[in-house]
Image (cartoon, rainbow, N blue to C red):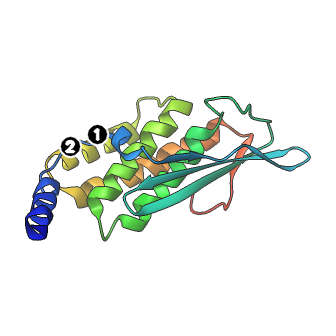
Amino acid sequence: MRAVMLFALLAGCSHPVAPHPASNAPAIEHSPVTQTGSHEWTVTLVRTSGRYSASGVVMTSTMPTTTEPVPYAGLAAARAWRTIAVATKVIDPRRAAEAAFAGIEEVEKLCKPRPDDTMLRIDVAKGAFERGNFKSAAVDGLTGLQRRIRQCLRKTPEVKVIPDDDM
């Protein structure tokens, strides 16, 4: 019986499915906005995909409201998705691509993208995902996500990321 259930689970996972970032987001935890200095606040969000979980943190010099949606939440969430995508890129490229797409969706809610080559890169990643080429989808999706995060940071100078990693 266990072998049949395992086979059914593996068979169900073997077919490429079009990415739907919202399907990655059922486990969302909101940490409250925290004041870390006289004129500094942090927004921290946790995102989970399967057994992988990561938190994204941004700092701002502008006091965010504590109502939904919390300003800069999309940027913090995108950073969490980016961490999951980086961690799973080699061992589970499908999950990495899905995390990248989820991060792109969240950061684009905060910073509306303009038509650019990043949009083309994201479209290429989605096409690769639909064809079942998850490695390519993960690489291009992660590149698109990193570019969107950098673009959003340029549009919101009151926000900085901690740690200031390779953004």
Query: Where in the figure is residue 43, as x and y percent of width and height?
Result: 68, 45
Label 2 secondary element: helix
Residue 73 sits above or below residue 109 on the image: below
Q: Nearer the viewer, residue 26 or 60?
A: 26
Question: Mark 2: which amino acid?
Answer: Gly
Tell me whether the residue at label 1 lies in contact with that at label 2, contact meaning CB atoms closer than 8 angstroms: yes
Q: CA distance from mark 1 to mark 2?
A: 6 Å
Q: Tell me if mark 1 has few (under 14), some (14-19) or many (20+) residues whose alpha carbon lies within 10 angstroms of its own.
A: some
Left-right relation of 31 to 128: right
Query: Where in the figure is residue 129, as x and y percent of width and height?
Result: 21, 49
Tell me the quarter of the image containing the N terminus.
bottom left
Residue at x 60% of width, y 39% of height: 73
Tell me the quarter of the image containing the C terminus.
bottom right
Residue 137 sits above or below residue 25 on the image: below
Residue 61 sits above or below residue 80 on the image: above
Left-right relation of 56 to 134: right
Question: Mark 1: which amino acid?
Answer: Asp
Left-right relation of 33 to 101: right
Q: Tell me if mark 2 has few (under 14), some (14-19) or many (20+) residues whose alpha carbon lies within 10 angstroms of its own.
A: some
Occupied quadrant, residue 11: bottom left
Left-right relation of 166 to 137: right
User: Would residue 117 be seen by someone viewing this image from the given angle?
Assistant: no
Residue at x 78% of width, y 45% of height: 41
- Residue matched to label 2: 127
Query: Where in the figure is residue 47, as x and y percent of width and height?
Result: 49, 51
Label 1 secondary element: helix
Number of marks in the image?
2
User: Would residue 122 be seen by someone viewing this image from the given angle?
Assistant: yes
Query: Where in the figure is residue 83, as x and y percent of width and height?
Result: 49, 60
Residue at x 59% of width, y 53% of height: 56
- Residue matched to label 1: 123
Q: Nearer the viewer, residue 68 or 120?
A: 68
